[in-house]
Image: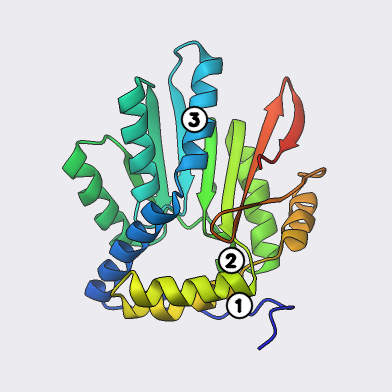
Amino acid sequence: MSLKQRKLVPEVMDDPALDRLRHVHALNGLSRINAWSGSSRGIWSAVAQLARESNGRQIRILDVATGAGDIPLRIWRAAKKHGVDVEIRAIDISEVALEFARARAGVYGAPIQFERCNVLVDSLPAGYDLVTCSLFLHHLTRPQAIELLSNLKRATRSTVLVTDLLRSWSGLRLAQWVTRLFVLSDVLRTDGPRSVRAAFSRVEIQEMLGAAGLAGASVVSRWPCRCQATWKKDEGAEKQIFDG
């Protein structure tokens, strides 16, 4: 099957009727994959930079479509280790995912605020120094993705950071390998390859950023088979910066 065009198919984990135990197994698997791939490293770099620029002021972070909540938890733990004052709010539509995330955060005593929010319908909370969204764009249609990017821009007073998969044969092979050997979830074994087939290309992402009012972007790849974009407001003039 060609990967020239994306193929958006509903993923098993997005089904509200998914059995809770299978959902939890999938969330555990996603947490392990994110740890292996270092998904939080780029976000922490952005937090550390904001901390250096803030002269000790608290950094407010919003994580959109947080899923298992493992990424904001890793950011909180890194902030605690380095003495950075952060306030983290994480939102998701799934009550199962939010319950899972709250339990994991509770183990570490992390005061992360997890809340239910349908980001395709509800307004995003605003006034955050850093707004992040990881591995969610590929779940959306192109118009939905453009609208979300525009809403992320409105929700921040400083920085937006978006990470997602890139559609490629190497990414597809990696998803098939990782979900078969690295996790036990049958849900992820189905959803992993579907996610790659539904992912956007670098060109498509750049076009959507322009349509969302974030023109002038250059999209760069991140290991493994992903891209990461950082957009910043600079002294009232909006500017997009993509870190490679």
Amino acid under disc 1: Leu
- Give the labeled residue for mark 2: 138
Which is more foreground, mark 3 or mark 2? 3
Residue 48 visible at all: yes
140 over 206 or under it: above or below: below
Disc 2 crowd rating (10 Å Cα; few below 14, some 14-19, many 20+) is: many
N-terminal-most mark, 1 or 3: 1
Task: Tell me where residue 143 appears, x and y as whole percent.
Answer: 70, 64
**C-alpha distance separating marks 3 and 2:** 25 Å
Determine whether the residue tagged by mark 1 lies in a helix, strand or loop: loop
- Residue 216 location, quadrant: top right
* Residue placed furthest toward the left: 107
Q: Quadrant of the C terminus?
A: top right
Say what amino acid the circle numbered 3 marks.
Val
Between 147 and 110, the one lying in front of the other is: 110
Query: As shown in the figure, which amino acid type bears the numbered disc 2?
Result: His
Q: Which mark is residue 8?
A: 1
State the count of labels: 3
Q: Percent position (x, y) of residue 172?
A: 56, 75
| Lower sequence index among marks 3 and 2 | 3
The picture places residue 171, in percent across and down from the top left corner, at 57, 69
Q: Secondary structure at mark 2?
A: helix
| Alpha carbon distance from label 1 to label 3 | 32 Å
Q: Residue furthest top?
A: 55
Q: Residue at label 3?
A: 47
Specify whether residue 126 is in view.
Answer: no
Drawn side of residue 155 relative to residue 110, left or right = right
